[in-house]
Image: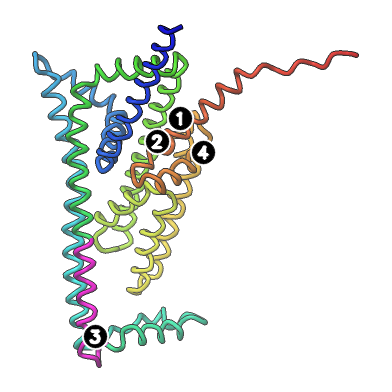
Amino acid sequence: MPDDSASLAQKTARYALTGALLLVGGWMLRHFLPALCWAVVLGIATSSLYDHWLAKFTGKRRHAWAALTFTSLIGIVLIAPIVFGGLVAVREAISLAHAFAEAGKNGPPELPQWILQLPWVGDWLRGQWAERLGHMGTSPDGIARAQPAVFEWTRIVGAQVFRRVVTLVFTLVTLYFVYLNRDELRADVPRVSRRLFGPTVEPLLARVVEAVRATVDGIVLVAVAEGVIMCGVYAVAGAPHPILLGAVTGIFAMIPFAAPLVFGAVALLLASQGAIGAGIAVAAAGSVLLFVADHFVRPVIIGGGAKLPFLWVLLGILGGIESFGLVGIFVGPALMAALVSIWRNWVREIPAAEPPRDA
Protein backbone atom coordinates (compact mmCIF):
# COMPACT_ATOMS: atom_id res chain seq x y z
CA MET A 1 0.00 0.00 0.00
CA PRO A 2 2.65 2.60 0.84
CA ASP A 3 4.53 1.87 -2.39
CA ASP A 4 1.35 2.02 -4.45
CA SER A 5 0.28 5.25 -2.78
CA ALA A 6 3.68 6.82 -3.37
CA SER A 7 3.61 5.73 -7.00
CA LEU A 8 0.16 7.22 -7.50
CA ALA A 9 1.22 10.46 -5.81
CA GLN A 10 4.31 10.67 -8.00
CA LYS A 11 2.26 10.15 -11.15
CA THR A 12 -0.24 12.78 -10.09
CA ALA A 13 2.54 15.25 -9.30
CA ARG A 14 4.27 14.51 -12.58
CA TYR A 15 1.07 15.08 -14.60
CA ALA A 16 0.33 18.26 -12.66
CA LEU A 17 3.85 19.56 -13.30
CA THR A 18 3.60 18.67 -17.00
CA GLY A 19 0.25 20.46 -17.30
CA ALA A 20 1.58 23.55 -15.52
CA LEU A 21 4.68 23.66 -17.74
CA LEU A 22 2.52 23.35 -20.85
CA LEU A 23 0.29 26.20 -19.70
CA VAL A 24 3.26 28.44 -18.85
CA GLY A 25 4.97 27.57 -22.14
CA GLY A 26 1.79 28.29 -24.11
CA TRP A 27 1.36 31.62 -22.35
CA MET A 28 4.99 32.53 -23.01
CA LEU A 29 4.70 31.65 -26.71
CA ARG A 30 1.17 33.01 -27.19
CA HIS A 31 2.31 35.69 -29.64
CA PHE A 32 4.18 33.10 -31.71
CA LEU A 33 1.41 30.50 -31.82
CA PRO A 34 0.04 31.82 -35.17
CA ALA A 35 3.50 31.39 -36.71
CA LEU A 36 3.75 27.86 -35.32
CA CYS A 37 0.29 26.99 -36.65
CA TRP A 38 1.14 28.40 -40.07
CA ALA A 39 4.36 26.39 -40.16
CA VAL A 40 2.50 23.17 -39.38
CA VAL A 41 -0.16 23.90 -42.00
CA LEU A 42 2.44 24.73 -44.66
CA GLY A 43 4.50 21.68 -43.74
CA ILE A 44 1.50 19.37 -44.13
CA ALA A 45 0.25 21.05 -47.31
CA THR A 46 3.63 20.94 -49.07
CA SER A 47 4.82 17.53 -47.84
CA SER A 48 4.44 15.83 -51.23
CA LEU A 49 6.18 18.70 -53.03
CA TYR A 50 9.00 18.60 -50.51
CA ASP A 51 9.44 14.86 -51.11
CA HIS A 52 10.14 15.56 -54.80
CA TRP A 53 12.41 18.47 -53.90
CA LEU A 54 14.40 16.40 -51.38
CA ALA A 55 14.99 13.70 -53.98
CA LYS A 56 17.03 16.18 -56.03
CA PHE A 57 19.67 16.51 -53.28
CA THR A 58 22.45 14.10 -52.39
CA GLY A 59 25.22 14.05 -49.84
CA LYS A 60 25.57 14.22 -46.10
CA ARG A 61 23.88 17.63 -45.72
CA ARG A 62 21.09 16.98 -48.20
CA HIS A 63 18.32 17.47 -45.63
CA ALA A 64 19.70 20.84 -44.49
CA TRP A 65 20.16 22.17 -48.02
CA ALA A 66 16.79 20.90 -49.19
CA ALA A 67 15.00 22.42 -46.19
CA LEU A 68 16.82 25.75 -46.61
CA THR A 69 16.19 26.14 -50.33
CA PHE A 70 12.58 24.96 -50.21
CA THR A 71 11.80 27.27 -47.30
CA SER A 72 13.40 30.14 -49.24
CA LEU A 73 11.20 29.42 -52.25
CA ILE A 74 8.08 29.44 -50.08
CA GLY A 75 9.25 32.68 -48.48
CA ILE A 76 9.61 34.33 -51.88
CA VAL A 77 6.14 33.19 -52.91
CA LEU A 78 4.59 34.48 -49.67
CA ILE A 79 6.57 37.65 -48.98
CA ALA A 80 6.49 39.11 -52.50
CA PRO A 81 2.68 39.70 -52.55
CA ILE A 82 2.76 41.26 -49.06
CA VAL A 83 5.55 43.68 -50.00
CA PHE A 84 3.87 44.49 -53.30
CA GLY A 85 0.55 45.08 -51.54
CA GLY A 86 2.19 47.36 -49.01
CA LEU A 87 3.83 49.44 -51.74
CA VAL A 88 0.54 49.70 -53.61
CA ALA A 89 -1.27 50.74 -50.42
CA VAL A 90 1.27 53.49 -49.73
CA ARG A 91 1.09 54.71 -53.32
CA GLU A 92 -2.70 54.77 -53.26
CA ALA A 93 -2.68 56.60 -49.93
CA ILE A 94 -0.42 59.30 -51.37
CA SER A 95 -2.68 59.54 -54.42
CA LEU A 96 -5.70 59.83 -52.12
CA ALA A 97 -4.01 62.61 -50.17
CA HIS A 98 -3.39 64.53 -53.40
CA ALA A 99 -7.03 63.98 -54.36
CA PHE A 100 -8.11 65.49 -51.05
CA ALA A 101 -5.81 68.43 -51.66
CA GLU A 102 -7.34 69.05 -55.09
CA ALA A 103 -10.80 68.68 -53.60
CA GLY A 104 -9.88 71.26 -51.01
CA LYS A 105 -9.01 73.74 -53.76
CA ASN A 106 -11.67 72.99 -56.35
CA GLY A 107 -14.42 71.36 -54.33
CA PRO A 108 -15.50 67.72 -54.41
CA PRO A 109 -15.93 66.02 -57.79
CA GLU A 110 -19.40 65.54 -59.20
CA LEU A 111 -21.12 62.20 -58.93
CA PRO A 112 -21.62 60.29 -62.19
CA GLN A 113 -24.90 61.01 -63.95
CA TRP A 114 -26.05 57.42 -63.83
CA ILE A 115 -25.90 57.54 -60.01
CA LEU A 116 -27.82 60.82 -59.87
CA GLN A 117 -30.51 59.36 -62.15
CA LEU A 118 -31.18 56.35 -59.95
CA PRO A 119 -34.83 56.33 -58.82
CA TRP A 120 -35.55 57.07 -55.15
CA VAL A 121 -31.88 57.14 -54.09
CA GLY A 122 -30.33 59.57 -56.60
CA ASP A 123 -31.43 62.72 -54.78
CA TRP A 124 -30.50 61.24 -51.41
CA LEU A 125 -26.99 60.38 -52.64
CA ARG A 126 -26.58 63.88 -54.06
CA GLY A 127 -27.50 65.39 -50.69
CA GLN A 128 -25.21 63.06 -48.75
CA TRP A 129 -22.31 63.74 -51.12
CA ALA A 130 -22.72 67.49 -50.80
CA GLU A 131 -23.14 67.30 -47.02
CA ARG A 132 -20.08 65.10 -46.45
CA LEU A 133 -17.64 66.67 -48.91
CA GLY A 134 -19.14 70.04 -49.81
CA HIS A 135 -17.31 71.80 -46.98
CA MET A 136 -13.96 71.12 -48.66
CA GLY A 137 -14.45 73.73 -51.30
CA THR A 138 -15.43 76.46 -48.85
CA SER A 139 -13.79 75.55 -45.55
CA PRO A 140 -10.02 76.06 -45.45
CA ASP A 141 -9.62 73.51 -42.69
CA GLY A 142 -11.53 70.80 -44.54
CA ILE A 143 -8.40 69.39 -46.09
CA ALA A 144 -6.60 69.79 -42.76
CA ARG A 145 -9.14 67.45 -41.18
CA ALA A 146 -9.05 64.99 -44.06
CA GLN A 147 -5.30 64.61 -44.54
CA PRO A 148 -4.52 63.40 -40.99
CA ALA A 149 -7.11 60.65 -41.42
CA VAL A 150 -5.43 59.57 -44.65
CA PHE A 151 -1.99 59.53 -43.05
CA GLU A 152 -3.35 57.70 -40.01
CA TRP A 153 -4.83 55.09 -42.32
CA THR A 154 -1.44 54.78 -44.02
CA ARG A 155 0.27 54.33 -40.65
CA ILE A 156 -2.19 51.60 -39.64
CA VAL A 157 -1.74 49.77 -42.93
CA GLY A 158 2.04 50.00 -42.61
CA ALA A 159 1.94 48.64 -39.05
CA GLN A 160 -0.26 45.74 -40.11
CA VAL A 161 2.03 44.91 -43.04
CA PHE A 162 5.08 45.01 -40.72
CA ARG A 163 3.32 42.74 -38.23
CA ARG A 164 2.41 40.25 -40.95
CA VAL A 165 5.97 40.25 -42.27
CA VAL A 166 7.38 39.56 -38.77
CA THR A 167 4.90 36.69 -38.30
CA LEU A 168 5.84 35.34 -41.72
CA VAL A 169 9.56 35.45 -40.88
CA PHE A 170 9.00 33.41 -37.70
CA THR A 171 6.77 31.06 -39.72
CA LEU A 172 9.54 30.46 -42.24
CA VAL A 173 12.14 29.88 -39.52
CA THR A 174 9.83 27.33 -37.87
CA LEU A 175 9.02 25.77 -41.24
CA TYR A 176 12.73 25.25 -41.93
CA PHE A 177 13.09 23.18 -38.75
CA VAL A 178 9.88 21.30 -39.54
CA TYR A 179 11.35 20.23 -42.87
CA LEU A 180 14.74 19.52 -41.34
CA ASN A 181 13.33 17.28 -38.58
CA ARG A 182 10.36 15.94 -40.52
CA ASP A 183 11.29 12.27 -40.21
CA GLU A 184 11.72 12.55 -36.44
CA LEU A 185 8.41 14.40 -36.10
CA ARG A 186 6.59 11.76 -38.17
CA ALA A 187 7.80 9.10 -35.74
CA ASP A 188 7.66 11.03 -32.46
CA VAL A 189 4.19 12.61 -32.72
CA PRO A 190 2.31 9.31 -33.21
CA ARG A 191 4.46 7.64 -30.52
CA VAL A 192 3.69 10.31 -27.93
CA SER A 193 0.02 10.37 -28.95
CA ARG A 194 -0.27 6.60 -28.53
CA ARG A 195 1.31 6.82 -25.10
CA LEU A 196 -1.09 9.56 -23.99
CA PHE A 197 -4.36 8.47 -25.64
CA GLY A 198 -3.90 4.91 -26.79
CA PRO A 199 -3.69 3.32 -30.26
CA THR A 200 -7.09 4.65 -31.34
CA VAL A 201 -5.62 8.15 -31.72
CA GLU A 202 -3.64 7.28 -34.89
CA PRO A 203 -6.67 7.29 -37.25
CA LEU A 204 -7.66 10.60 -35.68
CA LEU A 205 -4.26 12.14 -36.46
CA ALA A 206 -4.43 10.82 -40.01
CA ARG A 207 -7.87 12.35 -40.45
CA VAL A 208 -6.62 15.75 -39.20
CA VAL A 209 -3.68 15.69 -41.62
CA GLU A 210 -5.99 14.75 -44.51
CA ALA A 211 -8.36 17.56 -43.54
CA VAL A 212 -5.57 20.15 -43.54
CA ARG A 213 -4.26 18.98 -46.91
CA ALA A 214 -7.73 18.86 -48.46
CA THR A 215 -8.58 22.31 -47.09
CA VAL A 216 -5.41 23.81 -48.53
CA ASP A 217 -6.17 22.25 -51.92
CA GLY A 218 -9.81 23.33 -51.85
CA ILE A 219 -9.25 26.82 -50.50
CA VAL A 220 -5.91 27.99 -51.87
CA LEU A 221 -5.84 26.29 -55.26
CA VAL A 222 -9.45 27.13 -56.06
CA ALA A 223 -8.89 30.73 -54.93
CA VAL A 224 -5.82 31.02 -57.15
CA ALA A 225 -7.85 29.70 -60.08
CA GLU A 226 -10.61 32.22 -59.35
CA GLY A 227 -8.07 35.04 -59.22
CA VAL A 228 -6.51 34.04 -62.54
CA ILE A 229 -9.88 33.76 -64.28
CA MET A 230 -11.12 37.07 -62.87
CA CYS A 231 -7.84 38.70 -63.91
CA GLY A 232 -8.71 37.80 -67.50
CA VAL A 233 -12.27 39.05 -67.03
CA TYR A 234 -11.00 42.38 -65.66
CA ALA A 235 -8.58 42.76 -68.57
CA VAL A 236 -11.31 42.09 -71.15
CA ALA A 237 -13.71 44.45 -69.37
CA GLY A 238 -11.12 47.24 -69.35
CA ALA A 239 -10.74 47.53 -65.57
CA PRO A 240 -7.61 49.34 -64.33
CA HIS A 241 -4.77 47.20 -62.91
CA PRO A 242 -6.35 43.84 -63.83
CA ILE A 243 -3.42 41.79 -62.48
CA LEU A 244 -3.54 43.52 -59.09
CA LEU A 245 -7.32 43.23 -58.91
CA GLY A 246 -7.11 39.56 -59.88
CA ALA A 247 -4.60 38.91 -57.10
CA VAL A 248 -6.81 40.70 -54.57
CA THR A 249 -9.81 38.70 -55.78
CA GLY A 250 -7.86 35.47 -55.30
CA ILE A 251 -6.90 36.46 -51.75
CA PHE A 252 -10.47 37.38 -50.85
CA ALA A 253 -11.74 34.18 -52.49
CA MET A 254 -10.03 32.20 -49.71
CA ILE A 255 -12.58 33.65 -47.29
CA PRO A 256 -16.19 32.49 -47.80
CA PHE A 257 -18.47 35.16 -49.29
CA ALA A 258 -15.64 37.74 -49.46
CA ALA A 259 -14.83 37.63 -53.19
CA PRO A 260 -18.03 39.56 -54.16
CA LEU A 261 -16.65 42.57 -52.29
CA VAL A 262 -13.83 42.80 -54.84
CA PHE A 263 -15.52 42.05 -58.15
CA GLY A 264 -18.59 44.00 -56.98
CA ALA A 265 -16.40 47.04 -56.33
CA VAL A 266 -14.76 46.62 -59.74
CA ALA A 267 -18.18 46.40 -61.38
CA LEU A 268 -19.29 49.61 -59.64
CA LEU A 269 -16.04 51.32 -60.66
CA LEU A 270 -16.59 50.42 -64.31
CA ALA A 271 -20.21 51.52 -64.16
CA SER A 272 -19.20 54.84 -62.58
CA GLN A 273 -16.88 55.43 -65.54
CA GLY A 274 -19.76 54.91 -67.96
CA ALA A 275 -18.98 51.28 -68.89
CA ILE A 276 -22.24 49.93 -67.51
CA GLY A 277 -22.22 46.86 -69.77
CA ALA A 278 -18.68 45.96 -68.70
CA GLY A 279 -19.64 46.38 -65.05
CA ILE A 280 -22.63 44.07 -65.46
CA ALA A 281 -20.43 41.54 -67.26
CA VAL A 282 -17.86 41.57 -64.44
CA ALA A 283 -20.55 41.14 -61.79
CA ALA A 284 -22.21 38.30 -63.73
CA ALA A 285 -18.93 36.48 -64.46
CA GLY A 286 -17.82 36.78 -60.83
CA SER A 287 -21.15 35.53 -59.52
CA VAL A 288 -21.20 32.51 -61.85
CA LEU A 289 -17.57 31.65 -61.07
CA LEU A 290 -18.16 31.97 -57.33
CA PHE A 291 -21.30 29.81 -57.54
CA VAL A 292 -19.51 27.03 -59.42
CA ALA A 293 -16.47 27.12 -57.12
CA ASP A 294 -18.40 27.16 -53.85
CA HIS A 295 -21.16 24.71 -54.79
CA PHE A 296 -19.37 22.17 -56.98
CA VAL A 297 -15.56 22.37 -56.88
CA ARG A 298 -14.77 23.04 -53.22
CA PRO A 299 -17.30 20.56 -51.77
CA VAL A 300 -15.77 17.78 -53.88
CA ILE A 301 -12.16 18.62 -53.01
CA ILE A 302 -12.53 19.44 -49.32
CA GLY A 303 -15.41 17.14 -48.46
CA GLY A 304 -13.83 14.18 -50.25
CA GLY A 305 -10.37 14.64 -48.76
CA ALA A 306 -11.47 15.48 -45.24
CA LYS A 307 -14.36 12.95 -45.23
CA LEU A 308 -16.66 15.77 -44.10
CA PRO A 309 -20.02 17.09 -45.30
CA PHE A 310 -19.40 20.51 -46.81
CA LEU A 311 -21.71 22.15 -44.25
CA TRP A 312 -19.29 21.19 -41.48
CA VAL A 313 -16.37 22.35 -43.63
CA LEU A 314 -18.04 25.73 -44.11
CA LEU A 315 -18.81 26.04 -40.39
CA GLY A 316 -15.24 25.07 -39.59
CA ILE A 317 -13.87 27.74 -41.92
CA LEU A 318 -16.13 30.51 -40.62
CA GLY A 319 -15.67 29.53 -36.98
CA GLY A 320 -11.93 29.15 -37.46
CA ILE A 321 -11.59 32.62 -38.97
CA GLU A 322 -13.58 34.16 -36.13
CA SER A 323 -11.61 32.33 -33.43
CA PHE A 324 -8.06 32.05 -34.80
CA GLY A 325 -7.82 34.62 -37.59
CA LEU A 326 -6.66 33.76 -41.09
CA VAL A 327 -4.96 30.53 -40.02
CA GLY A 328 -8.38 29.38 -38.82
CA ILE A 329 -9.28 28.77 -42.48
CA PHE A 330 -7.20 25.58 -42.20
CA VAL A 331 -7.33 24.89 -38.45
CA GLY A 332 -11.14 25.04 -38.33
CA PRO A 333 -11.85 22.22 -40.82
CA ALA A 334 -9.11 20.09 -39.23
CA LEU A 335 -10.76 20.52 -35.83
CA MET A 336 -14.17 19.66 -37.29
CA ALA A 337 -12.70 16.57 -38.96
CA ALA A 338 -11.32 15.44 -35.60
CA LEU A 339 -14.66 15.98 -33.86
CA VAL A 340 -16.62 14.18 -36.58
CA SER A 341 -14.12 11.31 -36.50
CA ILE A 342 -14.54 10.98 -32.72
CA TRP A 343 -18.32 11.03 -33.14
CA ARG A 344 -18.25 8.30 -35.80
CA ASN A 345 -15.96 6.11 -33.69
CA TRP A 346 -18.24 6.46 -30.68
CA VAL A 347 -21.29 5.61 -32.79
CA ARG A 348 -19.60 2.47 -34.09
CA GLU A 349 -18.63 1.44 -30.56
CA ILE A 350 -22.20 1.68 -29.24
CA PRO A 351 -23.76 -1.81 -29.43
CA ALA A 352 -27.04 -2.19 -31.26
CA ALA A 353 -30.06 -2.20 -28.98
CA GLU A 354 -31.24 -5.66 -28.11
CA PRO A 355 -34.83 -6.54 -29.08
CA PRO A 356 -37.23 -6.52 -26.14
CA ARG A 357 -37.80 -9.93 -24.60
CA ASP A 358 -41.25 -11.46 -24.45
CA ALA A 359 -42.80 -11.39 -21.03
Residue drawn at 45 percent across, 39 percent down: 298
User: Which of these two is toward me, 29 or 272?
Assistant: 29
Instruction: Say whether residue 355 is left or right of residue 131.
Output: right
The quadrant in which residue 281 appears is bottom left
**Mark 4 neighbour class, 10 Å CA radius: few under 14, some 14 to 19, many 20 or more:** some
Q: Label 2: which residue?
A: 215
Q: Label 1: which residue?
A: 306
Nearer the N terminus, badge 3 or badge 2? 3
Q: Label 4: which residue?
A: 312
- Give the distance between the C-alpha atoms of the residues marked 3 and 2, in whole angstroms: 49 Å
Residue 253 x/y as whole percent: 37, 49
Q: Are marks 3 and 2 in contact (CB under 8 Å)?
A: no
Q: Which mark is residue 142?
A: 3
Q: Which residue is situated farthest in the bottom direction here? A: 138
Name the residue type under label 4. Trp
- Give the distance between the C-alpha atoms of the residues marked 1 and 3, in whole angstroms: 55 Å
Residue drawn at 42 percent across, 55 percent down: 285
Nearer the N terminus, badge 3 or badge 4? 3
